[in-house]
Every structure is written in structure tokens, then in C-alpha cells.
Amino acid sequence: QSALTQPASVSGSPGQSITISCTGTSSDVGSYNLVSWYQQHPGKAPKLMIYEGTKRPSGVSNHFSGSKSGNTASLTISGLQAEDEADYYCCSHAGSGTYVFGTGTKVTVL
Amino acid sequence: QVQLVQSGAEVKKPGASVKVSCKASGYALTSHHIHWVRQAPGQGLEWMGLINLSGGGTSYAQRFQGRVTVTRDTSTNTVYVEVSSLISEDSAVYYCATEPTGTGGCDHWGQGTLVTVST
């Protein structure tokens, strides 16, 4: 099972919107609505930002949103803020109870 | 509120095994999975496997089949991951995390356990 493909880095100015893509295959992202997104700050455990492709856990800001088209899922951060600077990972169910993470994207707020 | 508390850091020699624990508290996790995820220094997240707390069923990433075992002790609400035949590339922070079954999202995470494999 290969890691899902994400851009290594994405940057934007405060207030701008950015989108992080997560490309898999018809065996993972394309087959299941079980895509999640995690934010990780240095030295910290990951934090769930989106689950089931589009749903936000309680307490997560609504300037984070998720979507999916075919084999590619996306995370959009609207109104970029300084505290959004972190690493972001997608994760998808890949069949038979297994999961696979993306390669990770470093978000920089300029 | 769910809390996951993991065991402390470990230093192991190549070829040895390591067993990391994850104790859950807060409320009964009968409808949850516990996932194990690791992160090597400076690298990304890697999914290892999970256990279904309601039935005890497990699943593993293909690359860890036969070398990683996830178990549970229902009497203490503790889950374990054991990695055998350790190599230097197994040096990483190991995390446990809970997923409400069927959501695919891990909403609570342990603090992480650093495992160092070194001669």
C-alpha cells in the first residue's frame, strides 16, 4: 500500500485561502468516504480536523473544509491565520480495515 | 473526556522486541477502534494497525504483517502494540489514537512513546 500523494509545501498570506490535495487510487480515496485530515504542530500529536471527507469535529474552526472528487481529496483553509502554520496529513481507508496516510504538506503563512 | 496515556520511552538493541502500552480512560470505548501510528524523526505519519475494542479483531498494514501485533486487556482498558525483530529504521515516536467505529477519523491521541533502536 503506497502513501497518498500530497504537495510537499503550500504557502499563503494571512487571510488568503489555500487548498491541499491528497491523491490516492481507486482502492483507497476513490472507493471510500473515510478520508480524514490531521494538523500537526512541531513536537505535538496530530489533531483531527476533518473526518468522513467533509465533517468537522466539535471545536474545529469552520475555516477548515474538506471535499473529494474521484481519487483526490482536498483540504481548504479559508482565511489563513498564523496559527494554521503546521504540517497537514490526509488519511484514507484502504480496504480490509487498513488505512494509509498521505506524504504530508508543510503549510507556511507568509 | 477520553484520555490516552502511553508508556514511557524505550531503548532497544537491534533484533529485540518492544511492547508499548496505551491506557484509555474517560468513558467506555466499546464502539471504538484503537489505531497505532508511528513517526520517524523528521518524517511523516505511518499507519501500522488497529484493534476493534468491541470484538478484538485486528488489521495491519501489509508491511508490518507478521512483525507487529496489537492486543488488548479489557480488564484494564489497555491496548498494546508489540514490534519484533527491531531494526534502526523502527526508531520513531509511536502513537495510539481512538476512532469512533466507522468514522475513519482518530479524534483522541496519546502523548506518544519514543522508541530508539541502537547498538
Image: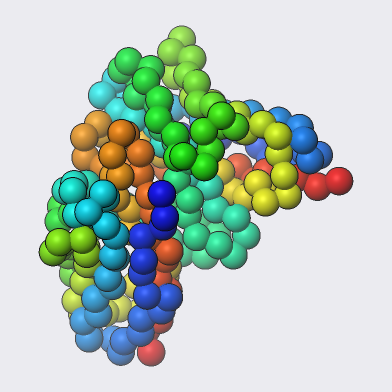
From the top left corner, tell me how far across and down residue B7 is, in percent.
61, 33
Outermost residue, front direction?
Answer: A26
In this rendered view, identify the residue nearer to me: B106 or B27.
B106
Query: Compared to A27, does A16 lie above or below?
Result: below
- Asked if residue A70 lies left or right of residue B35, the reply is left
In the rendered image, which quarter is residue A21 located in? bottom left
Percent position of residue B92, x then y: 62, 50
- What residue appears at the point 37 percent right and 75 percent down from the top-left corner? A7
Determine whether B35 is above or below A104 in the image.
Answer: above
* Image quadrant assignment for residue B54: top left
* Residue B60 image-quadrant placement: top left
Write the residue at 33% across / 53% down. A91
Residue A64 shown left or right of residue B54 in the figure? left
Going 59% across and 48% down the picture, which residue do you hit? B93
Location of residue A25 with respect to A21 vertically, above or below: above
Q: Nearer the viewer, residue A12 or B61?
A: B61
- Total marks in image: 0
Residue B39 versus residue A81: which sits nearer the camera? B39
Reply above or below: A104 against B53: below
Which residue is painted at 36% across and 81% down in the image? A10
- Residue sitting farthest toward the right: B119
Q: Percent from the top left, x then y, of residue B9?
A: 68, 41
Q: At which x and y percent is residue A101?
A: 39, 54
- By what rule are the colours in the image chosen? rainbow
Q: Quadrant of the C terminus of chain A?
A: bottom left
- Say whether residue B54 is left or right of residue B13: left
